[in-house]
Image (spheres, rainbow, N blue to C red):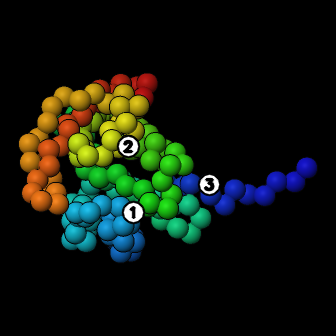
Amino acid sequence: MTSKPDREHPLIRRLVIEDVDRVFEIEKLAYPFPWTRGIFMDCLRVGYACFGLQIGKNLAGYSIVSSAAGEAHLLNLCIHPDWQHRGYGSLLLEDTINHVARLGSEAIFLEVRKSNPRAVDLYKNRGFKVIGQRPSYYKAGEGREDAIVMRLTLDPVNN
């Protein structure tokens, strides 16, 4: 029996400055109000944990998380629209959670748009709990949109 390598086997790696153009391209495709290229550059510059999901030669997604004082904040997690609905968001989220748990974070927080039920479900399925809202947190078509604030308690040893 012979087997061929899976060309869609994902690799999660640290992002580098050379990835920023592709990250920004994915961001613009995935969100109606994307982060700027400068925000991604700043995240790398200040040393946030920036991970890329690479499938073959394609950077297909990314996550950005900051950690301080025993807590982490998931700032952005995004999968290119062409690669969504294949489990890659869950994979990247799990890797990001494991990273901050290894650093000793006791919890990870995030904000998510109320109008993004797929993302809310992704986080709830991983065990995140809704802990509040941030009124008018996000820019929206005709104004502002509330954010749902979520928290996952981490067990650094068993996560």
* Picture residue at 43% right of the left edge, 61% below the top: 80
Which SS class for mark 2? helix
- Name the N-terminal-most of marks 3 and 2: 3
Horizontal placement of 113 versus 90: left or right? left
Task: Give the Cα distance between marks 3 and 2.
Answer: 23 Å
Task: Give the Cα distance between marks 1 and 3.
Answer: 18 Å
* Picture residue at 40% right of the left edge, 32% below the top: 126
Residue 86 is situated, as x and y percent measured from the top left of the image, at: 54, 49
* Picture residue at 44% right of the left edge, 47% below the top: 89
Q: Can you see residue 13?
A: no
Q: Is residue 159 above or below residue 56?
A: above
Q: Is there a contact, CB below 8 Å, between mark 1 and mark 2?
A: no
Q: Amino acid at mark 2?
A: Arg
Task: Give the Cα distance between marks 1 and 2.
Answer: 25 Å
Q: For label 1, count other residues whose C-alpha is less than 10 Å away and answer few (under 14), some (14-19) or many (20+).
A: some
Horizontal placement of 85 versus 40: left or right? right
Q: Which residue is mark 2?
A: 118
Which SS class for mark 1? loop
* Picture residue at 46% right of the left edge, 42% below the top: 90
Q: Amino acid at mark 3?
A: His
Q: In terms of depth relative to the viewer, which is nearer, 89 or 14?
A: 89
Q: For label 3, count other residues whose C-alpha is less than 10 Å away and answer few (under 14), some (14-19) or many (20+).
A: few
Q: Which mark is residue 5?
A: none
- Name the N-terminal-most of marks 1 and 2: 1
The mark lying in front, picked from 3 and 2, is: 2
User: Which quarter of the figure is the C terminus placed in?
Assistant: top left
Q: Which residue is mark 1?
A: 15
Q: Which residue is mark 3?
A: 9
Q: Is residue 119 above or below residue 83?
A: above
